[in-house]
Amino acid sequence: HYDRDAVLDGMAAFVETVERMEAEVDGPEAYRAAAKDLVRRYLPEGAERQRFSFTPDQELLLRGSGIRDLDALRFGDAEL
């Protein structure tokens, strides 16, 4: 069952978490460390040359979603 309101609430809470983390860090090294800690709350460390991996339950959701058929996200260099 897809609960759109719960998804939107979760996204808003995550944005608040990221904004709070960004406000609390000072400098590029601290930002990278805090960002990595934040990602690790949700995604385990990946294999060599991979930034993260998925948990078994996340893999199950991915298999059923068709999301793997989409083009990968591409990010430019970040600015602090």
Image: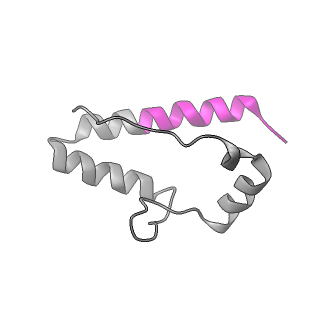
Compared with residue 30, is residue 24 higher up or lower down, i.e. above or below? above
Q: Position of residue 33 (x, y in %)?
A: 26, 54
5 part of magenta stretch: yes
Q: Which residue is situated farthest in the bottom direction here? A: 47
77 part of magenta stretch: no
Q: Position of residue 10 (x, y in %)?
A: 60, 37
Horizontal side of residue 44 vs 28, given as left or right: right
* The residue stretch that appears in magenta: 1-17
Tell me how many marks there are.
0
Horizontal side of residue 14 vs 58, given as left or right: left
Compared with residue 78, is residue 54 higher up or lower down, i.e. above or below? below
Q: In which quarter of the image is the N terminus?
A: top right
What residue is rendered at 71% in x and 29% in y?
A: 5
Q: Is the magenta stretch mostly helix, strand or loop?
A: helix
Compared with residue 62, is residue 13 higher up or lower down, i.e. above or below? above
Horizontal side of residue 29 vs 71, given as left or right: left
Q: Where is residue 2 in the image (x, y as percent from the top left)?
A: 80, 38
Q: Quadrant of the C terminus?
A: top left
Q: In which quarter of the image is residue 37?
A: bottom left
